[in-house]
Amino acid sequence: MLKISSTAGKVLAGTIIGATAVGGFATAAGTFSGSSSVICADNRTNALYAAPSNGVCSANRTAISLSQGVASVLPSTSIKSIVQKVSPSVVTVNVTTSTGGDTGSGSIIQSDSNSSYVLTNNHVIEAAATSGTIKIELNNGDQIDAKIVGRDANYDLAVLKVSKGNLPVIQIGDSSSISIGDSVIAFGSPLGLSGTVTSGIVSSLNRPVTTGGSASGVNSYVDAIQTDAAINPGNSGGPLTDSLGRLIGVNSAIASTGSSVSGQAGNIGLGFAIPINEAKRVYTEIITSPTHTSTRPLLGVYFDNAYTGVGAKISQLVTGEAAEKAGIPVGAVITAIDGNRVADQISAIVKIRSYAPGATVQVTATLPSGGSKVFSVKLGSSTN
């Protein structure tokens, strides 16, 4: 698990997208007569139904007394059913090298009759990229040799392959559909404790986070989902799911105060996950491309590291790339991308990285001559 400092410049507040919402568990179904003191919650969908006249729910539904209050009972019912659904598709990733070992987590994202693919973080398996061994441990305790298909340090993602088919696959969700306040569940092997589950809410969205944990010195930039679900070292690469058990994020980093007894920082309620919509593009390219590499969007600028004002100041343009083609001048200060405020150059990089190559974005910039202008920019592409 990558640790990121809580000081300014490492964890940066970005523009929050998505209205704050109360995390609901069910859509009411059926007609409530109001005469019964019991309602029935479907064990799979959490939909609420009026209880039969005898007050006894069917085998696939849980009885909830209205005197208890729905909220006091339904969350635990929901989490239990989601854990049963998701856990078989979560794995522990064990890495062994000549200098030691490490433990992380992963999700089974694809499986056919012969083999399966596992999504995890690059920093979990990077030490074994040139030498060493990787094994995954399934939910039932079975251990299987794994090999690296491909990895992308820029997004801190990696794909593993095992020669075992017909494994349970996690359901892929839509990270663009979540809102602040939504319930989430984190799965993984914190401190090597496999099969661990924690729950919480989405605390923030579009949180610009950069981590420098790559052995190759490459920083990863994440337009992160922030959660208060407990995430600790060993959770890296494991799934963050929504309240229906759909994968909406890859647990990747934690904020830390910098103090710990064991040398490894623990959870302080600030965990960060890579949105699955961003991760899906990367892992799909890794699996399907002949070179097992992925691409990243390219704006084609260099930022002024000495600039201390609000926004990201352009010090140089890359000839023939997106920004130059759009007419953005040197010295312009980017203040927003697609209407999302840009606080500094890290915010700008994170936001650009959240798009796919070829996407068209609206870049708002303050011009060197004064005034502000919106530029329509078609992003280029760079191969890792």
Image (cartoon, rainbow, N blue to C red):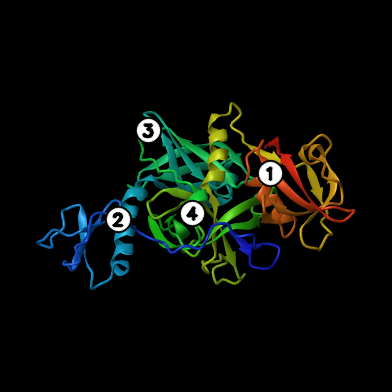
Task: Categorize mark 4 by other alpha carbons within 10 Å: few (<14), some (14-19), many (20+).
Answer: many
Q: Please state the horizontal and vertical placement of residue 54, each as a whole percent of the image.
A: 9, 62
> Which comes sooner in the sequence, label 2 or label 4?
2
For the C terminus, the image quarter is top right
Residue shown at 61% from the left, 28% from the top: 291
- SS category of the residue bearing label 1: strand
Amino acid type indicated by mark 3: Gly
Give me the disc on residue 46: 2
Give me the disc on residue 178: 4
> Which comes sooner in the sequence, label 3 or label 2?
2
- SS category of the residue bearing label 2: loop
> Which comes sooner in the sequence, label 4 or label 3?
3
Asked if the residue at tag 1 contacts the one at tag 2, i.e. Cβ–Cβ closer than 8 Å, the answer is no
Front residue of this view, candidates 46 and 381: 46
- Report the mark closest to the observer, 3 or 2: 2
For the N terminus, the image quarter is bottom right
Task: Categorize mark 1 by other alpha carbons within 10 Å: few (<14), some (14-19), many (20+).
Answer: some
Amino acid type indicated by mark 4: Ile
